Image (spheres, rainbow, N blue to C red):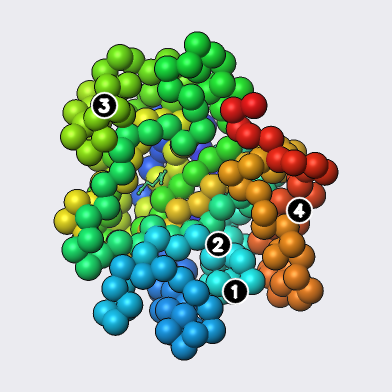
């Protein structure tokens, strides 16, 4: 997993997303699949808690905090150290820090149908574009499926730095009945990563509830203060022994989250 080429950077900046094909090795994919199986074993044994779509059939619900003390597995960290962290630094254009690290789990026929949204923006606000530009290039999100044929992320390419259109506002208000102009389905397989600006208009869309295990994580440039939506992880990260058990690059990413913690109350993104 190397740095992005100039062309990939350009695509990411202009389109708001870039897909890197077959950059996660089979070794890391298998290790993370096994890690999640181990997590389910521990949850079923009552050693930790996760959400379930169907517990008796071992179908987990979307799971956050995979680098937290109770859900940590070295498999994720070995992937970070084995090239992911370098790639993230390249996407961000400088040293990055941890924000959120989880898995989009689906299955069991349970419909997953998000409304269209921008994660961090204020659609329709008079200062919408100013807000979008303020954070541009300072954060990134990715989807990295561990299973084949992941076609559940829908995006509107090139929508990340401009004001929302009337049609986009209407689609967002329409919820699952939405008709979004220029929508595109992101088609991924195990080994691919889609890096995207979470301010693109996007949604997760798996109405059949097909099985899905997709690593879904967010990172910020190291000097960006921790904000309210990602607040509250410091104490857990500083649990004695936790940082010490991580390989160096992952540990750096987690330590930088701690270093970027605000003194007082966290600010909201839209402050
Ligand atoms: O399901 C997905 O791929 C998108 C999830 C997402 O971006 C969100 O929850 O905001």
Q: Which mark sits nearer the N-terminus, 2 or 3?
A: 2
Q: Secondary structure at mark 1?
A: loop
In the rendered structure, are the residues bearing label 2 and label 1 in contact, judged by CB atoms less than 8 Å apart? Answer: yes
- The reply to whether residue 90 is visible in this rendering is no
Residue designated by label 1: 70
Q: Which mark sits nearer the N-terminus, 2 or 1?
A: 2
In the image, is 49 to the left or to the right of 15?
right
Residue designated by label 4: 258
C-alpha span from label 1 to label 3: 39 Å
Relative to 231, does residue 37 appear above or below in the rendering? below
Question: Which quadrant of the rendered structure holds the C terminus?
Answer: top right
Which of the two residues, 81 or 137, is positioned nearer the viewer here? Answer: 137
Q: Position of residue 229 (x, y in %)?
A: 58, 44
C-alpha span from label 2 to label 1: 9 Å
Q: Which mark sits nearer the N-terminus, 4 or 3?
A: 3
Residue designated by label 3: 171
């Amino acid at each position: 997993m190397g740095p992005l080429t100039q062309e990939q950077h350009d695509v990411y900046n202009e389109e708001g997303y870039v897909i890197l094909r077959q950059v996660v090795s089979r070794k890391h994919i298998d290790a993370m699949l096994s890690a999640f199986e181990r997590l389910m074993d521990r949850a079923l044994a009552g050693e930790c808690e996760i959400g379930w779509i169907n517990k008796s059939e071992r179908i987990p619900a979307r799971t956050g905090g995979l680098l937290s003390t109770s859900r940590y597995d070295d498999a994720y960290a070995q992937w970070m150290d084995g090239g992911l962290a370098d790639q993230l630094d390249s996407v961000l254009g400088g040293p990055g820090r941890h924000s959120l690290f989880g898995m989009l789990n689906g299955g069991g026929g349970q419909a997953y149908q998000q409304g269209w949204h921008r994660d961090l923006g204020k659609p329709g606000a008079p200062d919408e574009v100013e807000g979008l530009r303020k954070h541009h290039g300072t954060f990134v999100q990715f989807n990295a499926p561990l299973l084949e044929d992941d076609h559940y992320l829908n995006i509107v390419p090139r929508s990340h730095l401009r004001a929302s259109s009337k049609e986009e506002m209407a689609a967002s208000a329409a919820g699952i009945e939405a008709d979004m102009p220029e929508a595109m389905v992101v088609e991924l397989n195990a080994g691919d990563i889609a890096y995207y600006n979470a301010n693109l208009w996007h949604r997760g869309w798996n109405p059949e509830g097909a099985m899905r295990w997709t690593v879904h994580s967010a990172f910020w440039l190291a000097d960006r203060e921790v904000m309210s939506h990602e607040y509250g992880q410091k104490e857990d990260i500083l649990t004695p022994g936790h940082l010490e058990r991580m390989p160096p690059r992952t540990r750096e990413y987690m330590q930088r989250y701690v270093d970027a913690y605000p003194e007082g109350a966290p600010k909201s993104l839209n402050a």
